[in-house]
Every structure is written in structure tokens, then in C-alpha cells.
Image: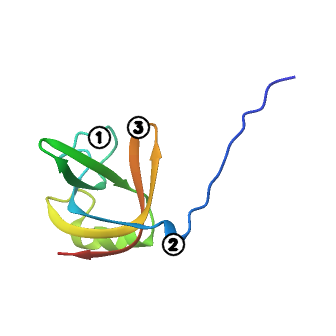
């Protein structure tokens, strides 16, 4: 008999949403995240320190990519969504956004 793994799934609600204001850039090319080109948002939180959020694929991300492409240069953006931390990274499920 093998040991089973316990997996806990937590579903976030709209009330858990946070607003992140920062720059939409390519996670691979600009932030050196080891994944194919993708939209990421970062904000400066202290001198020479950034908080980076990789955006989780969704219909809202597809709308962002229509404007920025999958490998964006740098666009000021405000995104609202649920933030999840996983293996040292921040991931954001976008529920709303606007370019600034």
C-alpha cells in the first residue's frame, strides 16, 4: 500500500480580491522568470525591491494580451484579483483591470 498525498484546495471569493498597481511587462524577457514569455505585473515596494505577480491564464488575461501581446514592453496597469503564493512566487487571477 502506498501513502496518499493530501491536497488542499482553497477557493477564493471576490471579497479576497486585491488591487495591484504597477507595470505589465514580459515575465521572461524583463523579469527573468524561467517560463515562456508571459504577462507579469510588478510594483516597487522598497528601494531596489520589486513584488512580481505572474498572471494566471483567464479571459481577462486574454483581454490584456490583446493590447500588450504575450511579450509586452512596459505598460502602466491596475489589476484587481486574487493573489496566490506558490513555491515562492506570486500569482494573480485577474477579475478586472484598467490601463493607466
Discs 1/2, front = 2
Secondary element type, mark 2 = helix
Q: Quadrant of residue 32?
A: top left
- Residue 81 horizontal/vertical position (percent): 42, 66
Q: Is residue 40 left or right of residue 2?
A: left
Q: Which residue is mark 1?
A: 33
Secondary element type, mark 3 = loop
- Residue 27 horizontal/vertical position (percent): 26, 48
Give above or below for 14 relative to 39: below
Q: Marks 3 and 1: in contact by CB < 8 Å?
A: no
Give above or below for 72 relative to 14: above
Give above or below for 28 relative to 1: below
Q: Residue at x 29, y 67 (%)?
A: 65
Q: Residue at x 23, y 73 (%)?
A: 67
Residue at the far right: name it.
Answer: 1
Q: Which residue is mark 3?
A: 88
Secondary element type, mark 1 = loop
Q: Quadrant of the C terminus?
A: bottom left
Please report whichever mark, 1 or 3, sits nearer to the chain's N-terminal start. Answer: 1
Res 61 visible: no
Q: Which residue is mark 2?
A: 14
Marks 1/3: CA–CA distance: 12 Å
Please report whichever mark, 3 or 2, sits nearer to the chain's N-terminal start. Answer: 2
Which color scheme is applied? rainbow
Count all numbered tags in the image, as a single digit.
3
Discs 1/3, front = 3
Marks 1/2: CA–CA distance: 28 Å
Q: Residue at x 32, y 37 (%)?
A: 34
Give above or below for 48 relative to 12: above
Q: Quadrant of residue 49?
A: top left
Q: Residue at x 26, y 77 (%)?
A: 98
Amino acid at each position: 500500500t502506498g501513502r496518499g498525498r493530501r491536497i488542499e484546495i482553497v477557493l477564493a471569493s471576490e471579497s479576497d480580491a486585491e488591487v495591484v498597481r504597477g507595470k505589465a511587462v514580459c515575465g521572461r524577457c524583463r523579469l527573468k522568470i524561467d517560463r515562456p514569455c508571459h504577462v507579469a505585473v510588478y510594483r516597487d515596494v522598497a528601494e531596489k525591491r520589486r513584488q512580481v505577480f505572474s498572471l494566471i491564464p483567464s479571459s481577462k488575461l486574454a483581454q490584456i494580451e490583446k493590447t500588450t501581446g504575450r511579450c509586452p514592453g512596459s505598460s502602466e496597469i491596475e489589476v484587481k484579483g486574487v493573489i496566490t503564493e506558490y513555491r515562492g512566487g506570486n500569482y494573480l487571477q485577474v477579475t478586472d483591470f484598467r490601463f493607466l
